[in-house]
Image (cartoon, rainbow, N blue to C red):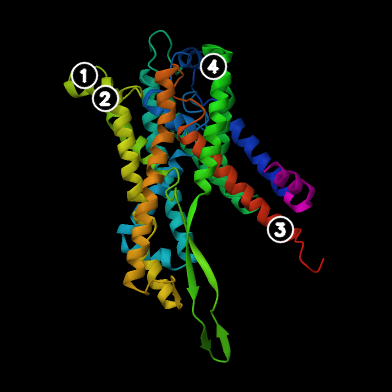
Amino acid sequence: MLGAYVNAFRTPDLRRKLLFVLMIIAIFRLGSQIPAPGVNVANVHECIQGSTGGVYNLINVFSGGALLQLTIFALGIMPYITASIILQLLVVVIPRLEALKKEGQAGQTKITQYTRYLTLGLALLQATGIVALARSGSLLNCDNSRFPLLYDNGTKTFLVMVITMTAGTAVIMWLGELITDRGVGNGMSILIFTQVVARFPSSLWSVGKSKGWWVFAIVVAIGLVIIAAVIFIEQAQRRIPVQYARRMVGRKMFGGSSTYIPLKVNQAGVIPVIFASSLLYLPAMASQFNQNATSGWAVWVQSNLVRGDHPLYMALFFAMIVFFTYFYVSITFNPEEVADNMKKYGGFIPGIRAGKPTEDYLSYVLSRITLPGALYLGLIALIPLIAFVLIGADQNFPFGGTSILIMVGVALDTVKQIESQLQQRNYEGFLR
């Protein structure tokens, strides 16, 4: 991996692209440290010492800690992720969006535009909720009379902060698209990777400082094993061989080649973890907006579904991840469509008839490899919660959950893209 980066910096045009990406990352991190107008920075730092983020842990991870510090980039990339997931689901159920997807590049451009609009709408809603919680002191569970998070609780300050955070999300989208167009890799993924990695050293340091350096060494050793296991599973795939028959078109012969359909063990990526976390946030967030309520449901939610060390929370989280893994794989990989395309172009799986038998075979294989993928996602997502119970580390434990999945996945994808560009520029063929 390091060799790919070294060789990339030796190639002039790739070096320019990588330096451009680093410049965008620096701007992005700078914006994540600038407080929004009206924020009492001293009180925020005072309150954040005793807060783990509560129900906002996932958003705080994706913002690199900027959410709880109420910076101009406080919302991070989370509104865009949510908008992208919603559009992916709507493509399946809305015929107009499905037709746009089949139109190729023009249709994809239109869907991307819809994603941007939806991102801004979600950012506006999230910013309104976050600023309202900050104004009441509920965001960090802080005594608002002693440590007010905002200098002024007036409507003007409220609106300025909401507009600033929404505009910050728009800037983040623009920075991500700049990386995609002029840099290397997927811009949004790299920005997510940046924010997750930004919290990694502080999380490790807090483990060593609070639990001792022997525990720190054990955590690092276990972390290396987890990273190796994640890399192994992320690269694992079932390759279904496909043979294309020879066909004559005019005077030319086509086909006769062999290829394969790669079905990854973790076909869904990190999306099921985000789905499960988001749904578990809803009752917890509703109870937090009604903290003074004495209703039984609010008390039950605060007792069972806010802290990750509760067995019920863990069981629900794991079950929802398994469910959403199957759900997401079922809407993103359509065996019927793949079988029809293979039949259309003269392809077949050796030993399997084209058409319905091929569709049934693909569904069978997909269901079998999705189970270990779902169990793997559930176990990785539970690692921070288990660490919280065993060693008392906070729920932002570095080796596990969405953090490690994003770090490994984005790093592998970026290295693959760098290597493919290096092969285009430094190809050593048999004539050399």
x, y percent for residue 303: 27, 19
Q: Secondary structure at mark 3?
A: helix
Identify which amino acid the numbered label 4 is placed on. Answer: Val
Residue, far bottom: 251
Sequence order check, earlier mark of 4 and 1: 4
Asked if the residue at tag 3 contacts the one at tag 2, i.e. Cβ–Cβ closer than 8 Å, the answer is no
Answer yes or no: is residue 32 visible. Answer: no
Residue, far top: 146
- In the rendered view of the protein, which quadrant contains the C terminus? bottom right
Span highlighted in magenta in the image? 1-14
What's the CA distance linking mark 3 and mark 1? Answer: 63 Å
Asked if the residue at tag 2 contacts the one at tag 1, i.e. Cβ–Cβ closer than 8 Å, the answer is yes
Query: Which dot, 2 or 4, sits closer to the camera?
Result: 4
Sequence order check, earlier mark of 1 and 2: 2
Sequence order check, earlier mark of 3 and 1: 1
Residue at mark 1? 293
Q: Quadrant of residue 401?
A: top left
> Front-most of 228 and 292?
228
> Front-most of 399 and 306?
399
* Residue at figure coordinates x 67%, y 40% from the top left: 22
What's the CA distance linking mark 1 and mark 2? Answer: 8 Å
Q: What mark, if any, has residue 215 been given in the picture?
A: 4
- In the rendered view of the protein, which quadrant contains the N terminus? top right
